[in-house]
Image (spheres, rainbow, N blue to C red):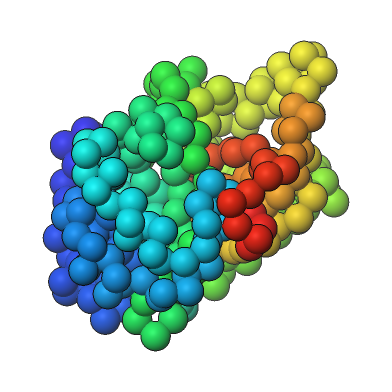
Amino acid sequence: MKKSIIAAASAVIASAAVLADTPKGVAVAEMASLFKDFDKVQAAATMAPDLIQHNQAVPNGAAVLIDLIPTLKESGISATTHRLISEGNMVVAHNEYKNAKVFGGDHLAAFDVFRIEDGKVAEHWDNLTPVTAPNPSGRTQFDGTTVVTDLDKTAENKAVVTSFVYDVLHGKAPDKITDYISTETYLQHNSGVADGLDGLGAAIKAMADAGLSMTYSDTHMIIAEGNFVFTASEGEFSGDHVAFYDLFRVDGGKIVEHWDVIQTISEKSANDSGKF
């Protein structure tokens, strides 16, 4: 499994030249300029000068990131993209960062979202969280299916996840959960949740017993390609105002796999773009 993940990630980076004129290619080239090649010229060519930044620790504008490149190189940071999907001009990368203290942690799991305009990254959102030990089912925040399939079912799969988010996560009709999540196969990559609906139920009960709550109040983005659907939502977790970034894999009309990154939304920000 580890070898297959590494191979998939290497293929994503290697495909940058082939995909250069696509939104995926632009996003891959931008990430490579910052975390692989440490190339200021390449970075400037892939980012709009007035790039809108939603990472609350980073000011708006491409110059900030370009000027940070020497520091990134010196830090020894590396990035591995485990999954990459796109819909229209939006690209989502499921990333793993190592030696990432410049971003607040040595080893981080992240989702990076890019809006591409005129062949450049024009806007960027992200969620980051520390990498933790495997969950009760032995799954990590990165392993699992990586290949995008079922491109002809993109709209259908997006509709399944959209209905799940509003009915179940937003609490409009939580009893419909088995309409959306498979009762036979549900692979979970959240660090504290085991596989299956039983694992999800046990985690929810444990939270309730501990007096912890999790609510989704707004969903700001839903991006789909084939069997993968990404959502970016806002809500509350354990009393904190948070951003929920979730990635779902759909098979046969049901959600069968899930990854997520939850990050607290700060009251202070280095930019005026807002988290979403």
Report the residue at 23% width, 76% height from top: 20
Residue 220 point in image, percent of width and height? 67, 61
Q: Residue at x 40, y 66 (%)?
A: 62
State the image coordinates of residue 98 (x, y, percent, origin top left).
30, 34
Is residue 178 among the parts visible in the rendering? no
- Residue 162 lies left or right of residue 98; in this view the side is right
Query: Relative to residue 241, is residue 65 depicted above or below?
Result: below
> Which quadrant of the structure image shows residue 221?
bottom right
Given the current orientation, which residue lies at the most extreme right position? 172
- Residue drawn at 76 percent across, 55 percent down: 218
Q: Nearer the viewer, residue 259 or 41?
A: 41
Residue at x 28% of width, y 43% of height: 71
- Residue 272 lies, with reference to residue 269, above or below; the image says below
Can residue 66 be seen here? The reply is: yes
In percent of width and height, residue 39 lies at: 19, 60
Q: Relative to residue 109, is residue 265 drawn left or right?
A: right
Above-or-below relation of 169 to 37: above
Question: On the picture, is 216 further left or further right than 52?
Answer: right
